[in-house]
Image (cartoon, rainbow, N blue to C red):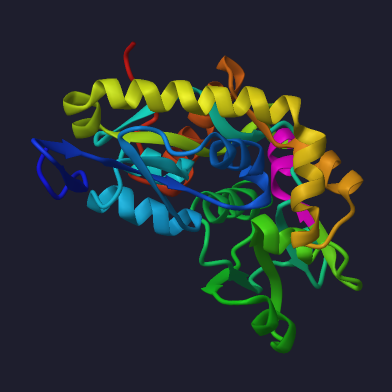
Amino acid sequence: MAGSECARREIPGTMDRKCILGMVNYINTSHIYIPWKEMGPLEGWSVLEGYPTLLNEKLLRGEIDAGIISSFSYGLNSDRYLLLPNLCISATGAVNSVTLFSKRPLNALGSALIYLTPQSATSVSLLRLILELFYGLRPRYETGKFRDFMQNNKAGAYLAIGDEALRLRDQNGLFHFDLAEIWLEQTGLPFVFAVWAVRKECWTDRAELVLSLKQRLLQCYNVGQMELKKISQQVAGRIPMSPAQCLSYLKGIELEFTAEKQRGLERFFELLVDACSAPLNRHITFIGG
């Protein structure tokens, strides 16, 4: 692997290549993130934290070697990546942290201006499918912040994700539309927001490190499921929300990448290709071993 593909450090007597894992520190990843931190460093890997679209860019540029990235980014660049099996960020029905906050009913948005969070690629693409394909609307889109939306009388809605969406959940006077819930109603399938991807060069050159990463993440998942109540108590204050609310929320975040989730992701890609001419690969490829 070229030096630009994997960070290097010198160890006396050897040259070791230490790979970089990109992780998102949102509440919806806490049942992976917190067990990872508690287990300590994984040999051969360092961690870089960032929001989803930043990790998308860094994986594409080879500045990290693996990480949790948006499903949309994987579809755009699947010729460069392989997926770790068994794990993703998904939901079957309402997820509560991918929300369109609107000043009017959904079918009344028409050609309204929609402000979009800059932190997500998948949710933006999902929103466009919902509004344009499922509801036949033709809104205008602009990247912005919630305050821009609230201050602009011509703006119809704002798309928020992750912790921001949770913080805005009690906004009065606005309609709240959960995108994963609408997706399930329209397709009958779960929705996959993010996947764990590895650059093909890293798998080719450092397969043993990738397999150890896969094993560690599965361990984190198992610990996270067993300690979900404790984790909810640890992270609820970030929003803030009660530990009980946080526990309910985390139970709705599904981390298993089942065959049904794969069908949901492939359907998402198919609709984007057919309806929006998006240059996506419809097929999913996992690492071997």
Residue 187, x across and y down, in percent:
67, 31
Is residue 79 part of the magenta span, yes or no?
Answer: no
Residue 246, x across and y down, in percent:
82, 47
- Residue that extends furthest to the front in the rendered view of this protein: 12
- Quarter of the picture containing the C terminus is top left
Q: Is residue 191 left or right of residue 42?
A: right
- Residue that extends furthest to the top in the rendered view of this protein: 289
- Quarter of the picture containing the N terminus is top left
Query: Looking at the rendering, which quadrant does residue 166 occupy?
Result: bottom right
How many tags in the picture? 0
Query: Looking at the rendering, which quadrant does residue 35 occupy?
Result: top right
Q: Is residue 64 left or right of residue 12?
A: right
Q: Is residue 116 left or right of residue 147?
A: left
Q: Is residue 197 above or below residue 30?
A: above
Residue 277, x across and y down, in percent:
38, 46
Q: Which residues are magenta?
A: 177-185
Residue 205 can be seen in this image: yes
Give me the residue at 59% from left, 24% from top. 261
